[in-house]
Image: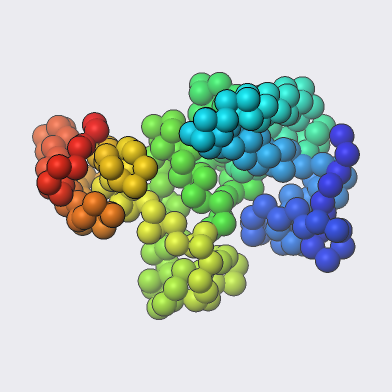
Amino acid sequence: MEKIGGVNMEARFWSFIDWADEWNDTSGMPDAGLKGPLTMETLLYIYGLQHAGCLADFLGRSEEAKLYRGRAKTAQTAVLEYCKGENGMLQDGPGIDKYSQHCQVFALLTDTVDMETGKKNLLKTIKETCYTQCTVAMRFYLFRALEKTGLYAYTDQYWDTWRNMVKMHCTTCVESVAYARSECHAWGSLILYELPSITLGVRPAAPGYKKVRIASVTGYLTNASGVVKTPAGDIRVAWKIENGAFKIDYEVPQNLEVVR
C-alpha cells in the first residue's frame, strides 16, 4: 500500500491524528507512519465515505450512496487483511506491531469489526496503559465508541482533562494536555455537545428540530438536569436514578413531537 502523508513540514501532506505524548516526535502522527501507510487514515476515509453515503441518501442520490458504501467496504476488507494483529486488534500500520486506542475506536464506529470484538478491544485500551490513548483532539470519537458499546460510564476518567481546565483557570478549552493553555479549538469544546446531546439526551429526530429525540445516557452519573436551546425553543430535562430505577421529566415547546 502506498503512503500518502507524513510528518509535518517534511511531507507534502501532514498525517496528523492526535497530540498523544507517544507521537510528539512525529508531530501528532503515529510513528508507524515513518515506515508506511497509516491504518487510521484509511479508517477516517471509511468513516467519511459512510457518512457521505447517508448524505447522498438524504438528497435522493442513491447511486452515489451505493458508490461511497462500496468504496468503504473495499477499504474495510483491506484493513482487516493487512492491519489486523495476532491479538485481534487493528495495528497502527500494516504489519507493524504497534496499537493505539484510536484504531480500535474507529474500527468500532465504522463497523469494520463486529460489536463484540470492538468492545473487547476498546476495553483493553482502557484497562491497559501500554496503548496510545485518545487525547483532547480525539475524545469526541472515543466517547461515541463508549456510547455505542454501552461503556459510557468510562468517560468519568477522561473528563479529568476538562476538570483540570477549570482548576487551571482556563477561560477556553485547551488544545492539548501537554501544553495546556486557553485556546479556542473546536475539539476541546466536546463538553458543549456532550452535556445537552448525551447527558440530557436531546437530539434532533428530523431536520431543523421538527421532531426531537430525548434519550439520556446516564453513564457514571445518578442525576442531571438542564435546559437545551433548539430552533424550536427551550427543552427542559431532569432525570435521576432512584432505587435502581431511571426516572425522567421533560418539557418541550408546544406541538413539538418527541420521539423516544
Give me the residue at 74% from left, 62% from top.
27
Asked whether 230 or 44 is in front, the reply is 230
Q: Is residue 191 visible?
A: yes
| Image point (59%, 49%), residue name | 133
Q: Where is residue 180 in the image (x, y as percent from the top left)?
A: 54, 72
Could you tell me which residue is drawn at 49 percent across and 49 percent down? 140
- In which quarter of the view is residue 106 placed? top right
Horizontal side of residue 170 vs 109, given as left or right: left
Residue 143's spot in the image, x, y percent? 46, 44
Residue located at (71% from left, 55% from top)? 16
| In the image, farthest residue toward the front | 60
* Residue 220: x %, y % from top left: 31, 44
Can you tell which quarter of the image residue 22 is in? bottom right
Horizontal side of residue 185 vs 98, given as left or right? left
- Picture quarter containing residue 14? bottom right
Compared with 208, 242 (above or below) is above
- Tally the numbered discs: 0
Using the image as rendered, state which of residue 117 and residue 183 is in the foreground: 183
* Rendered-image quadrant of the C terminus: top left
Please state the horizontal and vertical placement of residue 46, each as a whole percent of the image. Answer: 65, 35
Q: Where does the N terminus fall, quadrant-wise?
A: top right
Q: Which of 41 and 254 is in front in this view?
A: 254
